[in-house]
Amino acid sequence: MNDTPIHLRAGGTSLVVAVDGGRLPRILHWGPDLGELGDAALADLHRAALPAIGDSAVTYPQPVPVLPQLTEGWLGRPGLVGDSDGRRWAPFFREATHEVGDTPEGPVLRTSARDPDYGLAIDIEIQVLGSSGLVRQRAGIRNDAAQPYRVGSLELALPVPSDATEILDLTGRWALERVPQRRPFRVGEWVRASRGGKPGLEHTLLLVAGESGFGFRHGTVWATHLAWSGNQVLAAELTPAGTRHLAAGELLLPGEVVLGQGEEFRSRWQYGSWGVGLDELAARFHRHLRSRPRHPRAPRPVVLNTWEAVYFRHDLDTLLELAERGAELGAERFVLDDGWFLGRRDDTSSLGDWTVDPAVWPKGLQPLADRVRELGMDFGLWFEPEMVNLDSDLARRHPEWIFDAGHGPGLPSRHQHVLDLGHPGAYAYLFERMSELVGSLGIAYIKWDHNRYLLDAGHVPDGRPGVRTQVQQAYRLMAQLKAAHPGLEIESCASGGGRVDLGVLELTDRVWPSDCNDPHERLEIQRWTGLLVPPELQGTHIGAEESHTTHRTHPLDYRAEKALWGHLGIETNLLTADDGTRAALARWVAFHKEHRALLHTGEVVHADLADAAYRLEGVVSGDRSEALYAFSVVERPATWPPGRIRFPGLDDARHYTVEAVHPGSAPAAGAVLPPWQRAGVTLSGRALRLVGVEAPSLDVDRSVLLRVTAS
C-alpha cells in the first residue's frame, strides 16, 4: 500500500486516516461524510492537516497516532504503559504495514507494527460500522521476547477538532444514576475511572465533547464509550499543542496482564459516535444495537416483577394470586425476585445457596411456574450469581472461593462478598445450579443482579488480582447458559444501572437503569441512559404510588407514562390495588402494546427547551408517519403559562394531526385546556417544528401524552 491516506466511509461517517512513514495510524478527520475522495484529494487533505513545525517536533507533535507514543514526542497520556522489571518501558512501534478490508459490519483498516529493539508487536483495527456510522477500534500487544512483559495500560484515542470546547459526562449514585455534568474542555486531562469491578452507578457511560452549548438537536458532538463491564478509564485531553482527543481503555490492576513469550493482550473495543446534537449521536448507538442479528425482534413482553409487591415474603398462594391479577392486566412475563432460595428471609444470609427453599416451597417452584404459563405468561427468576453471604452453606463449605486480597474477605457491602469465578469449582457450581433450574422450570428470563463492588478481589490462595478474570468469567457464564438454553433472556442489573455497557449488552437482552421507580427521577435516568441504550433494552416499571426509594407520591398516570417509553413492567402491588387502579393499569398496558412497535423501533427525539422546568421528548417512526411525545413539567417554572411546544423529528413536507391521548384517565371536568387539545389540530411538519402548539398548563410532575399521525 502507498502512503495515500485511507478513507473509510459508512453510515454517514467519514474517517480519514494517515498511514505514511511506517507510523501507526493517525486520524485526520472523524465526522460528517466527505463524499468520494480520490488519491489526489486525500493527499491534499493530508497536507492541509499538517502543522508548521520549527526546530522541535516534540513541541508540535500533530497529528497524533491513535496509540500515542512517548518516543514520537507525545507528552500526554501514554497509549501503552508496560515494562520488564524496569526495562522496555518506552516502546517505539514502527515499520507499520496497513491493509484495508471489507467485512459484513463495515470497512476496516488493519495495521501491524513492531518494535524490533524491544521484541514487541502491535496490531490495530479501526472500523466504521455500516449500519450506524459508529467508529470502533482496538489493539493487540504481543510479546516476542523471552522476558515477561507486564502491561500497565493500553489506551486508544479518537481525536476531536478544535470546535469541541465543552465536555459532558454523567455521574450518579444508587437510585440516582446518569446525572449530567458539563465543563469547559481546557488544557489538561479530565479523567473518569471505574475501579469497582463493574462500570458502576457513578459511571459516565459516555464521555462527550462538543461545540459550546450543544444540546439534543444542535451543536456537533463527539463521544467515546468502552465496551467492557469491568475496571476502565475514559479521558478527555487537551495539550498545549492543541491536540484534543478522547481516550479509553481497561484499568488494569498490578500483575493482571503479564505476557510470556508469544502471548498477547487485546484491548476492548473503543466506540466513537458523532452527530449534530445528542439525538443523532445516540441514534448511531441505537442503530448499531438494533442491527445485531441477536437483537430482540419479537415484541418485548410486559413484565410483572414481584419485588416491590412482596419483597422477601414468599408464599405460593399469594404469588399465584399476584400472577392471576397480572395476567388480567395483560402482563406477559412473571419474574420471581429475591427470596426463593434456601434460608433466604432477608438480605443478611443464604446468598449463593441456589436451592429452592422447601420450607417456603414444599413442592418447589414448579407449581408457580406451571400456573404462570397457564395464564399465558413466561416465567423468570432472580439470581445474583457473583455474590455470596458469609452466612451461607456455600461460604462455609468453600471459603477459598471468596475473594481475599490478603486481609480476609474484606468489608461487607449489603452483607455481601464476592464469589471468585476464576476458581473452576465455583464456576462449575454456578453453571450446574443455574442451568438445572432453567431447564427444569422452563425459565425464559434471568434477572441477573450484581450488588457489591469488587474492592478486594484477590484470588485465593495467592491473592493476585482477579477482577479482569471475574468479568470474563461472568461473560462466559452468560454465554454458556444461553447456548445450553436457546431463547433464554438475561437482564443486566447491578444495584440498578451499575453494569450498562456495550460489552454486557452483547450477552444480555435488557438493562435495569435504576432501582428507583419514582417517575420524577426516572424521566432523567432514562433520558441519559438513552444516549447509549434504545428504549426496548431499558427496563421501565410502573412502581407504587409512594416510591420505594424516594417516598414521593405520584398519580398512576404519571408513573405509567414515564414507564411507557421502554420495556414496560409492573412493580406495584396488585394485591392491594383497587378495581379502578387495576382497570387503569390495564388500559396503560393495552396502550403500550398497541404502540410498542413504534416505541421499540423508532428514533428517540428530545426538544431543546429554554426553560429547564419543562421536558418534551418522544419517539418518531422511521418513515416519519407517526410519533408519540410527552410534555412534562418537572419543576415550578419562573414564568407561566409555558408557551408553545415545537415538535422535533417530523417530516417538514407532510401534514400531521396532533391530539392529546389519555390511556389511563381523562382530564378532570372543568380542566383548563388550550383550544387545540379539545379537538386536535392538523399542521405541516414544518409548522409543528417552527411554530408548534400551545402547551397545556400542568402542575409539577404531571405530563400530557401527544399522538402525532401523518394525514
Image (cartoon, rainbow, N blue to C red):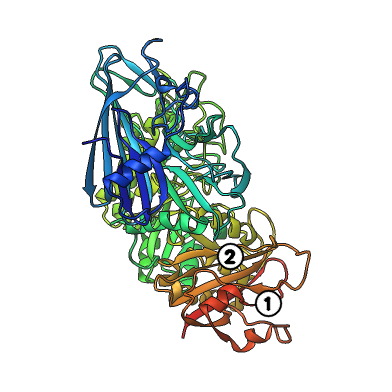
Q: Which amino acid, mark 2?
A: Ala
What is the number of the mark on residue 205? none
Verify CB contact (< 8 Å) between mark 2 and mark 1.
no
Position of the N terminus, as image quadrant, is: top left
Q: Position of residue 309 (x, y in %)?
A: 56, 60
Q: Amino acid at mark 1?
A: Pro
Q: How far is disc 2 from disc 1 in space, using C-alphas?
A: 16 Å
State the mark number for residue 696.
1
**Residue 197, above or below 71:** below
Q: Secondary structure at mark 1?
A: loop
Tell me the crowding category of disc 1: few under 14, some 14 to 19, or many 20 or more residues within 10 angstroms, Cα based: many
Which residue is at 32% across, 28% downward? 23
Residue 207 appears anywhere in the view: yes
- Quarter assignment of residue 516: bottom right
Marks counted in the figure total 2
Residue 117 image offset from top left, x and y in percent: 29, 13
Q: Please tell me which of labels 2 and 1 falls first in the chain.
A: 2
Disc 2 secondary structure class:
loop
Q: Which mark is residue 607?
A: 2
**What percent of the width, then of the height, locates residue 142?**
28, 24
> Residue at horizontal 57%, vertical 42%?
202
